[in-house]
Amino acid sequence: MATKYVKNAVGRMIPEKINGKPVIPYQGVHQYKTTGRRYAPPLATCADYPEDGNKLEDDLKTALKKAGLKNGMTVSTHHHFRNGDLVANQVFMAASELGVKDLVWFPSASFPCHEPIIEYLENGTIHHIEGSMNGPLGRFASLGNMKGTGVLRSHGGRYQAVQDGEVVIDIAVIAAPTADSFGNGNGLTGESACGLLGFALADSQYAHKVIVVTDNLIPFPCIPWQIQGNYVDYVVEMEQIGIPEKIVSGTTQITKSPDRLFIAELTAKFCDEAGIIQDGFSFQAGAGGTSLAIGNYLGDIMREKGIKARFARGGSNQYLVDMLEEGLIDYILDGQTFDLAGVRSMRENPHHVNTSPFTSYNYHGKGNFAPLVDVVILGATEVDINFNANVVTHSDGYLLHGIGGWQNCLFSKNVILPIPLFRDRIPIIRDEVTTICGPGELIDVIVTERGIAINPRRKDLLDAVKNSQLPIRTIDELKEEAEKICGKPEPVEFGERVIAAIKWVDGTVIDVVKQVLE
Amino acid sequence: MATKYVKNAVGRMIPEKINGKPVIPYQGVHQYKTTGRRYAPPLATCADYPEDGNKLEDDLKTALKKAGLKNGMTVSTHHHFRNGDLVANQVFMAASELGVKDLVWFPSASFPCHEPIIEYLENGTIHHIEGSMNGPLGRFASLGNMKGTGVLRSHGGRYQAVQDGEVVIDIAVIAAPTADSFGNGNGLTGESACGLLGFALADSQYAHKVIVVTDNLIPFPCIPWQIQGNYVDYVVEMEQIGIPEKIVSGTTQITKSPDRLFIAELTAKFCDEAGIIQDGFSFQAGAGGTSLAIGNYLGDIMREKGIKARFARGGSNQYLVDMLEEGLIDYILDGQTFDLAGVRSMRENPHHVNTSPFTSYNYHGKGNFAPLVDVVILGATEVDINFNANVVTHSDGYLLHGIGGWQNCLFSKNVILPIPLFRDRIPIIRDEVTTICGPGELIDVIVTERGIAINPRRKDLLDAVKNSQLPIRTIDELKEEAEKICGKPEPVEFGERVIAAIKWVDGTVIDVVKQVLE
C-alpha cells in the first residue's frame, strides 16, 4: 500500500503515518491546539516497595528483567554525559543478550560514542531511535539502514511528547553521578559529575519503570534530589557511568577564526545598536566557538554601559560562570553544563539554577521560559530566503545533528543566527532548505561575515538600526553574493523512503528526512 | 433512603457513600492495592498564555472569575501560614460576593484564623471542607452545622487523593511569600516568609487552574521556584498574605511542666536503651513543648556518645536548627518551618532541605521517606489497649484537630507516643478510642509519666530493654492506674449523622466522626 502524503503549513509533504502511528502535520506557529490530557501512568503503592527504601539490584540486566523488559518496549536514556556516556550501550547489550527485539530507543540525544548501537539496530534488538542521531547513527539512518523511522524532537518537544503520552516510556534508565539506594540522584558530585539531570525529568515522572544507575552510591539522603527516588523502581551500582573528560565536551574555547570573530563582534554590535542590551535584559548564547565570542563581546558592552543582565540561559561554561561571578549576570538558568566550571558553579552557587525542559521549553505547559529571553543566538546548517532554517541535515542530505533546544529557543524575543555565508564552499543561504526545522516567521536576524539580513517581518528592528553603521542587507543579496563566489548549489537527489520525521514543539510534524542515495 | 454501613478492618462502621460518592472501607495496613492511574489534568498550550510571561491579574476576584469559578467547584489553599493566613478567607469572601454556591474547600489544613469561613458555610457558598478543621470549624462541623460531610486526610493522603484523581481541584489558590509574574514562587523571603510551599505542590501540579497570590512580587526569575510558574495560570499581588508573627505559631518553647519533662526524658532514655540512637540514625520529634524537650535530650545523648544523626525530619524550629549548625545532624528534611530560625536556615543552608508530601508521605508512590526514619515521636488525644490511636477528636467527641503527617509517620521504624496518663482528669488510655486514626499494629511504644508500654508485637523492643531500669508496664496496667485516679470515663453519646470521614493513607476510610449531641 502506497504511503499517503499531506502537505503541511510550510509546504512539506508529510506521510499520514510514521512507524504505523498517525501523525498530525504542522499547522503553523500557535495554530495547533491540543485538547488532550496529561499522560496518566499506572499508580504505584508503597506496599510493593522495600520498607527500608533500599532498591538496589545486582546489575543492569537484573533490573531490566525485573522491570519487565520485553519485545517492542520503549526504553529511554539521557544525554547529560554527552559523548562520554557509558550507559546506553550497556542497556542495549543487556537487552540483546536477553534476546529482546524491536525496542524503541528514546534517548534525549545520542552521540558518536553510541556508534556500537548500530550492532543492536542491525541484529533487531532496536527497531528505531526517537531522538537526535548525531554523527554515525544519523549516517546509518540516512542510508536507509534503520528498520523503523527516526523521530526527532526538540528538548521541549521531548518533554511534551512524554507528558502528553505521545511516547509512553516503558523503562527509563537514568544515569546519576550521585545517588542513594532509594533512587534520589543528582549530577553535581562524583567522578561522572555532569551538573544536572533535567533531560531525564520527564522520564522519571512518566515512565512505567525507572532504573537509576550510578557509580557514586551514597547513604540516603542524596541531596539535592534532582531525580526523586519516589519515582524510581530500581537502583544499580556500576563501576563507571561516564568518561569525565568526554562529558564536558563540545567547543569550549573561543573561536580563533578571524571570520567567526568578525561575525561574533557584528552580532554583539547589532544587539547593542538595536537596543536589546539594556539593564536587566536576558540572553542565551550557546557553547560553540562563535557563541562564546559573542558572550564575551556582550560582557564588554555590559561593562562599558555599567549594566547587568537579569539572567542568562545556559548551556553553561567557564565564560558564563565568570560573568555570573563578576556580577554581570544575576542568574544562570541552566539546562546543561558544558564544562567543569559549569558543574562547579551549579554545585556551589545558588544563583546558578538547574532547569529542565519542563520549565524552559515545554510547549504544552502554562507558558515556559523561552519567550522571556530577550535575545538568543543560535546556529543553523542552512537558512532559506524566507528565513526558514535547518539544523539537522547537511546540504548533502545526511541527517547528522539533533534539534536540541533550538526550536524552543525560536520563541525568544529576538532570534539571531550568526552563520558564515558558506562552509566548504557550499552556500548556507538557499532558495529552500533541505529540511525545515524552524519556520522563518520566528527567525529574526541572520548575521554573516558579509552583512546582516533582518527578517522583513521585524520592522521594529529594521527601524532601530536604520541609521547605524551596520552592514544591513537583504537575505537575497546575501544569497546572491554567496552564489557569486561558490556557484549555485546542485539539488540533492533523495530516495523515496522517509528515514526520519522532524517534530515541531507541539507534536506536529514540520518536515521529514528522506533516504540519501549513495 | 437509609445509609448503608460496612464494617471495616478495624471494626468501624463506614457508610457506603460520603458526599454522594462511594468510599472504600479500610482493609488493613498494606492490604488495599490501587489499580488506578495517575490523574490526568487537561493539557495546556503556550498559545493560550501571555508571550511575555506576565500573568498578573488585578485582584483575586478577577482571577477567580477568569479561572471559571462556578457552583460546586473544589477550591484549594495551603496552610504554610498556619494561624496567620490572610488568603483563604478572602477567597471565599470573593466567591460569596460572586454568588457562587456549594463549593468544596480543600485546604491542606485550616486553623482558628479561618473562623470567618463559618459565614460562607452558613450562606451556602461552601458545601463542605475536605481537610483538617482545627478548633472553631471542627466544633461547627461536630454540631452538625456543615451542609456536607468533612473529609480528613493526612498530608500524604492529601497528595495521594489529588494525584489519584480522588479529589479534582478546579482552582488552587497558592499564597507565595515571594513570586514573579510568571507564577514562580517560594516561601523563603518576603514579609510573609513561611519557609517552603510543599503542601501546595500537588495543587500546583494537578489543579485545572492555579492562582498564585503574593505580597512580594519580584522580577523573573523567582529563585528557587518551589512552585513552578509553568503550572500557574494567574498571579495576583496583594497587600498582605499572612501575619508574620502568627505564621510561626505553635509551641516553640520547651515545656516547663515537670511531668512533661519527665516524659520527655523517659522517651529519650528509652530510645537510648533500645539501641535506636546510633551513629547515622534518623528521627522526627515534632514541635510541641514535650517534643522539643525530647529533641534536646536526644542531642545530649548524641553529644555524650560522640555520634551524629544522618537526618532529622522537620517541622523545623530553633532547636533543630541549632543541632544542624552544631553538626549533630547532617540534614534536616523539612516539611514545614515552625519558627523564623527554621525559615532562615532553609533559606541559607543547603543541608536544610525542603520536602513535600510527595517525597515524604505519598503512599501511592514508589516508596516514600517515612519508613526510612528510625524513630518518630508523635502525639495522640487517646490510645486504646490495642494501641490504636486517635488524633482528631477529644474524648467528648468534638472534632478539633487535623491528622497532619501523623498517619504517614506511623510507617517509621519505631513509633513512640509520649503522652500524659490523663488530661483534665480524663484518662488518655481507653478500652476503645473515640476515633481510630491509626491502627495499633503501627504504634510501638507509649511513654507516660507512670511508665512505658511496649506493643507486644514488638518483641525486639521488649527484649532490648528487658534488663534496663526503665519502668516497663503493660498498657492495661497503665489504663487501670489512670482509671484508679480519675475513675472510668463515661461513654459519650453521639447523634446518627456522620459529620466527617477519616481517610487512611491509601484513600480508604478508617473511621468516621459522628455528630455531637449538645
Image: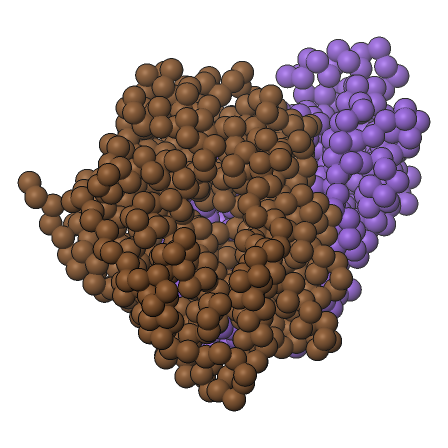
Chain colours: A brown, B purple
Answer with left or right where residue B349 lies relative to residue A177.
Answer: right
Provide residue B84's location: percent of width, then percent of height.
69, 64
Question: Residue at 86% across / 27% down in the picture?
Answer: B307
Question: What residue is shown at x 72% (from left), y 21% (from top)?
Answer: B454
Residue visible at 28% across and 31% down in the picture: A127
**Residue placed furthest toward the right:** B304
Residue A434 showing in the rendered view: yes
Query: Is B136 in front, or is A63?
Result: A63
Image: B250 above or below A213:
below
A504, A116: nearer the viewer: A116
Above or below residue B134? Residue B484 is above
Q: In the rendering, at what x and y percent does residue A262 appear?
A: 56, 66
- Residue A286: percent from left, percent from top: 55, 56
Q: Residue at x 16, y 44 (%)?
A: A496
Quarter of the image that includes the C terminus of chain B = bottom right
**Where is B458 relative to A195, above or below?**
above
Towards the viewer: A2 or A234: A2
Residues B78 and A64: in front is A64
